[in-house]
Image: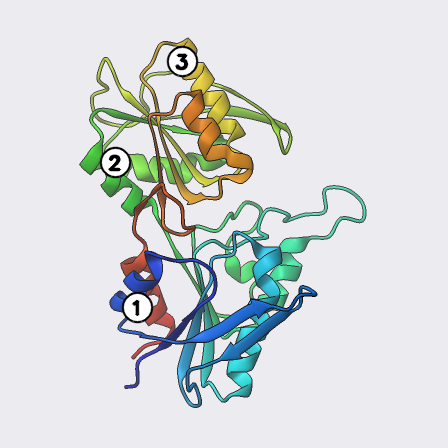
Amino acid sequence: MTPLLLFTLGDHPALQPALLAAAGAEAGHCEVRHFPDGESYVRVLSECAGRRTAILCTLHRPDELFLPLLFLAGTLRELGARSVGLVAPYLAYMRQDKRFLDGEAITSRQFAGQLSSAFDWLVTVDPHLHRYAGLDDIYSIPSRVVHAAPLLAQWIRAHLANPLLIGPDSESEQWVSAVAAAAKAPYQILEKIRRGDRDVSVSLPLLPARTGGTQAAEPTPVLVDDIISSGHTMLETIAHLRAAALAAPVCIGVHGLFAENADVKLMAAGAALLVTTDSVAHASNAIGLGATLAAAVAELEPQ
């Protein structure tokens, strides 16, 4: 069977070679640039007629990447690709899942409709599902969701002594508890009040651990979240930890977006270490997703 032809859009210095190797895929080559007026230029350089193809593109800058992504997918189809899949480790436009104010666009549904019309299948990592039971609620194409919790737990067990996992809010408890269980560590969940995109407050109860295991007298706080964007929740939590004279925390996120220099702010606030998966390229990447993504791709594009 001819191997999957995998094109890459955007910067994936570690993830792309890892995914290629794990999936047994062949690297596809293309040229993507912008004209002086800002319009996108896309050219496919690899022969793709009759081939199974996919595009690796993390969508942390969706407004910048979306049109080139659609143009590349459409060109692959025009050139005779047998199938076109999307590997989007970070899937954007999942948060606006209802009309909070009259006239608001429910962008998660519109974005899903556009991607569903352009691709045959989708693989992503821990999308921000809140009011949706699953991707099938808004995506009409086959999809697979890779869960990073086992990989986070593996990293915690290998690198941290006496971890105490801390989740940002009640919505996070289900998956933070899964990381804690796999890491054989206790966990706590914060109470969070969000008044706006940049106005968040949290309370840190420091209650006894709610899972099995023995909590050390000097635990290592581990702040765990699926997305680290502005970092305001973690910044607030670090302030609580410092006030309680606890150890400097390790901040772990599945997707490290680090908007508005959040990574710099977190370290300046007293974080001991930032750790993320390589879903978004960043210096904090310490947890590789290549093999896990390859397994999900194989379910949708078998050899």
Around disc 3, counting alpha carbons within 10 Å, would you say few (fewer than 14), some (14 to 19), or many (20 or more)?
some
Q: Residue at x 27, y 36 (%)?
A: 181
Q: Amino acid at mark 2?
A: Ile
Separation (CA) of disc 1 from disc 2: 26 Å
- Check if mark 1's residue and mark 2's residue have beta carbons within 8 Å: no
Callout 2: SS? helix
The residue under label 3 is 242
Among numbered discs 3 and 1, the one appearing first in the sequence: 1
The mark closer to the camera, 1 or 2, is: 1
- The image quarter in which residue 197 lies: top right
Among numbered discs 2 and 3, the one appearing first in the sequence: 2
The label number, if any, that marks residue 156 in the structure image: 2
Residue 168 visible somewhere in the drawing = no
Callout 3: SS? helix
- Residue 238 position (above or below residue 92): above
Around disc 1, counting alpha carbons within 10 Å, would you say few (fewer than 14), some (14 to 19), or many (20 or more)?
some
Among numbered discs 1 and 2, the one appearing first in the sequence: 1
Please tell me which residue lies in front, 174 or 244. Answer: 244
Q: Residue at x 46, y 16 (%)?
A: 239
The mark closer to the camera, 2 or 3, is: 3
- The image quarter in which residue 204 lies: top left
Q: Residue at x 39, y 76 (%)?
A: 28
The residue under label 1 is 20
